[in-house]
Amino acid sequence: MAYGQRSFGPREMHKATCSDCGKECEVPFKPTEGRAVYCKDCYPKHRKPREF
């Protein structure tokens, strides 16, 4: 392994319901009550555009 690289192994996934379309999905963090969670299809619609 090269300097600066880390191996974390498999991520723990948590079941969630997409706040946009209502589909069940899995996310790599524990969803917090009151915060929106988006599936992989809806997430790009809600991302803030990058500023350079």
Image: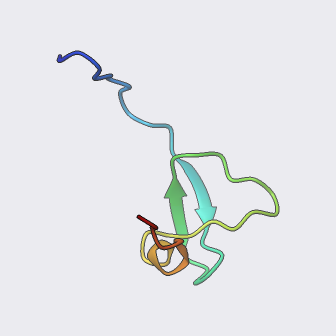
Q: Is residue 26 above or below residue 24?
A: above
The residue at the point 59 percent across, 46 percent down is 29
Q: Position of residue 35 (x, y in %)?
A: 75, 63
The residue at the point 50 percent across, 38 percent down is 12
The residue at the point 50 percent across, 70 percent down is 39
Quarter the C terminus occupies: bottom left
Q: Is residue 42 above or below residue 5?
A: below
The residue at the point 29 percent across, 20 percent down is 4
Q: Position of residue 42 (x, y in %)?
A: 49, 78
Q: Residue furthest left?
A: 1
Comparing 28 with 44, the one in front is: 44
Comparing 7 with 48, the one in front is: 48
Q: Position of residue 23 (x, y in %)?
A: 55, 76
Report the colour scheme.
Answer: rainbow
Q: Is residue 21 above or below residue 13?
A: below
Quarter the N terminus occupies: top left
Please identify the quarter of the rendering in which residue 37 is found: bottom right
Comparing 5 with 29, the one in front is: 5
